Image (spheres, grey):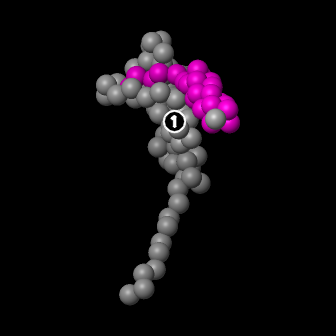
Amino acid sequence: MIQRCSIFVMSIVFFSVSCVYAETIKLKNGKTVEGKILEKNSSSIKVDISGLSITYYVDEIENIDGVMISIPKETSSSASLAARNPADIFQDISPAIVRITTKTAD
């Protein structure tokens, strides 16, 4: 009986501790997500929801724990990108373009 009680108490303590670190994320589509933020940068956050890591982009998020999220203003690098020649932009990004081909059994 004592062993069952101790397992039950340990389960409650573990559940309570795991819930303490959860943030509440309200999305712009009206949904609410609760989880631990694993990583945060200027464009997205990565959230651990029951062991599953999910990325949400800043433009999808309304607030985190009631704190409004602001989308960064256009930076000088993005402004200079708009002023660049399309051929130069292609030269810079073309190494990131891939082509995938597959063969079927037919």
Q: Nearer the viewer, residue 58 or 46?
A: 46
Classify residue 46 by image quadrant: top right
* Badge 1 element: strand
x, y (%) of residue 71? 46, 20
| Magenta: main secondary structure | helix
Can see residue 80?
no
75 in the magenta segment: no
The residue that appears at 52% across and 56% down in the rendered structure is 97
Q: Amino acid at mark 1?
A: Ile
Q: Nearer the viewer, residue 7 or 63?
A: 7
Query: Which quadrant is home to the N terminus?
Result: top right
The residue that appears at 39% across and 26% down in the rendered structure is 32
The residue that appears at 31% across and 28% down in the rendered structure is 29
Q: Which residue is mark 1?
A: 49
Lateral position of residue 11 relative to residue 103, left or right: right
Region rendered in magenta: 2-27
Q: Nearer the viewer, residue 60 or 24?
A: 24
x, y (%) of residue 106? 38, 87
Relative to residue 94, is residue 86 depicted above or below? above
Q: Residue furthest bottom?
A: 106
Relative to residue 57, is residue 52 depicted above or below? below
x, y (%) of residue 42? 56, 25
x, y (%) of residue 30? 31, 25
17 in the magenta segment: yes
Q: Nearer the viewer, residue 54 or 7?
A: 7
Q: Residue furthest top?
A: 67
The residue that appears at 34% across and 24% down in the rendered structure is 28
Can see residue 52?
yes
